Image: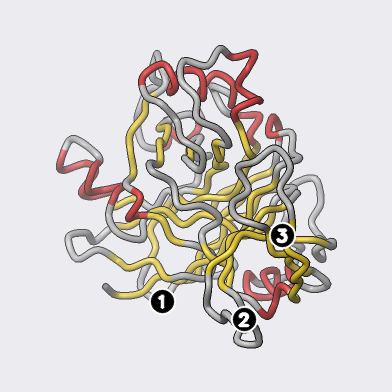
C-alpha cells in the first residue's frame, strides 16, 4: 500500500480537512534499475508523472491499524494537496552510514551507529518550501531512505523489527554545514524549521535492502547510491535506537545519505528519488 496524508479538495464539503488515504493506481515510472527518475525528465515533470492516473481513497482515522478501512470517498491525486505523510513525535537520524559519504567529509565510519534527533517542527511535506536559515551560509542536501514506525515499540530484537515498521518514504536531511562544523553538535545545524522534508507517501510493501537513491539539484544529478551500501541496515538501526528510546507510531528514522552532498541556494529545486517509492521535491526560499 501507498499511504499518504493530504488535505481535502475544494470540491469536498469539508474542504481543507486533513486525512490519511490510500494512493491507488500506477505512477508513470520511466526509471530503470539505476534510479527512479526517468532520463531527461525534470523534477517538476517527474512529480506530475507520479500523479498521472492515481487516485486517493480516504481512510477512516489513521493508518496505524492492522486493517485500515476506507470511507468510500475517492479523489484524483492531482486534486488534493499532499502533506508530510506523518507528523512524528521525533525524527531519529543516523550519520555517516555510507562509507563514501563519511570519506567525502573527512570522517571515519563510526564504531557504533551515530544518531541524532531532528524535532517534529523540522518536518515538511512534498512541494513545501525549505526556508534557508539566517544563521547559515552553507546549507546542504542529503538524500535518505526514511523508515516510518507503525507501532509502539522498545528494545526490539533484530528478528522482530519488521513487525514494528509501517513502511518507507523519501527524506532530505537538510543540513547547515557551517553551523554543524562550528558548533560541535548538530541540534541547530540539522534541526532548524523545514530541515526535514519527507514524502510523497509511505510505501508499505517494499524490500529496503538494495534500492537506488538519488538527489538532483535543478535537475542536475548530485547524489546517486544504493541502500545496499549502508554500513548498517534497517534491522540493526531500529534495534539499536529502540534500545535507548521508545518509538511511537509515526516516528521516523533517517538511515543516512550516500556521497555527493553539496550546497543549495535560494531558488534551487531539490528532489530526492528512491526506487519503488517516488520523488520528493522542494524549493529553497529565503527565510
Q: Position of residue 268 (x, y in %)?
A: 45, 72
Q: Position of residue 145 (x, y in %)?
A: 57, 42
Q: Tell me: residue 52, above or below residue 126.
A: below
Q: Nearer the viewer, residue 239 or 38?
A: 239
SS class, disc 2: loop
Q: Nearer the viewer, residue 66 or 107?
A: 66
Q: Which colour style is shown?
A: secondary structure
Q: Which mark is residue 267?
A: 1
Residue 37 horizontal/vertical position (percent): 71, 59
20, above or below 129, in the image:
above
From the viewer's side, name the closer residue of 200 and 37: 200
Identified at 56% across, 54% down, the residue is: 215
The crowd level at tag 2 (other Cα within 10 Å; few <14, some 14-19, many 20+) is some
- Kindly identify which residue carries mark 3: 37
| Percent position of residue 238, x then y | 51, 24
- Residue at left 34%, top 44%? 118
Q: Is residue 150 left or right of residue 251?
A: right
Q: Is residue 180 left or right of residue 244?
A: left
N-terminal of the pair, mark 1 or mark 2, is 2
Tag nearer the camera, 3 or 2: 2
Residue holding disc 2: 9
Measure the C-alpha gap from mark 1 to mark 3: 21 Å
Query: Label 3 to label 2, Cα distance in Å?
Result: 28 Å
Horizontal side of 167 relative to 191 (left or right) equals right
Callout 1–callout 3 Cβ contact below 8 Å? no
Residue 81, above or below 64: below
State the CA–CA distance, disc 1 to disc 2: 28 Å
Disc 3 + disc 2, Cβ < 8 Å? no
Amino acid at each position: 500500500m501507498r499511504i499518504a496524508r493530504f488535505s481535502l479538495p475544494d470540491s469536498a464539503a469539508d474542504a481543507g480537512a486533513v486525512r490519511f488515504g490510500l494512493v491507488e493506481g500506477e505512477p508513470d515510472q520511466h526509471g530503470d534499475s539505476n534510479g527512479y527518475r526517468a532520463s531527461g525528465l525534470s523534477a517538476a515533470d517527474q512529480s506530475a508523472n507520479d500523479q498521472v492516473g492515481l487516485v486517493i481513497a480516504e481512510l477512516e482515522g489513521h493508518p496505524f491499524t492492522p486493517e485500515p478501512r476506507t470511507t468510500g470517498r475517492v479523489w484524483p491525486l492531482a486534486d488534493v494537496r499532499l502533506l508530510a505523510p506523518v507528523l512524528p513525535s521525533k525524527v531519529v537520524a543516523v550519520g555517516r552510514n555510507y562509507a563514501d559519504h563519511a570519506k567525502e567529509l573527512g570522517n571515519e565510519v563510526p564504531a557504533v551507529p551515530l544518531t541524532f534527533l531532528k524535532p517534529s517542527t523540522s518536518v515538511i511535506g512534498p512541494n513545501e518550501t525549505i526556508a534557508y536559515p539566517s544563521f547559515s551560509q552553507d546549507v546542504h542536501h542529503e538524500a535518505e531512505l526514511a523508515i516510518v514506525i507503525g507501532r509502539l515499540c522498545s528494545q526490539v530484537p533484530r528478528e522482530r523489527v519488521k513487525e514494528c515498521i509501517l513502511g518507507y518514504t523519501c527524506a532530505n536531511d537538510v543540513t547547515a554545514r557551517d553551523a554543524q562544523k562550528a558548533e560541535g553538535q548538530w541540534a541547530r545545524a540539522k534541526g532548524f524549521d523545514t530541515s526535514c522534508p519527507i514524502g510523497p507517501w509511505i510505501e508499505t510493501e517494499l524490500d529496503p535492502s538494495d534500492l537506488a537513491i538519488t538527489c538532483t539539484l535543478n535537475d542536475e544529478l548530485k547524489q546517486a547510491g544504493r541502500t545496499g551500501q549502508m554500513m548498517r541496515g534497517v534491522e540493526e538501526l531500529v534495534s539499536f535506537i529502540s534500545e535507548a528510546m521508545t518509538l511511537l507510531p509515526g516516528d521516523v528514522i533517517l538511515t543516512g545519505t550516500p556521497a555527493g552532498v553539496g550546497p543549495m541556494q535560494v531558488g534551487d529545486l531539490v528532489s530526492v528519488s528512491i526506487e519503488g517509492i517516488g520523488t520528493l521535491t522542494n524549493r529553497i526560499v529565503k527565510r
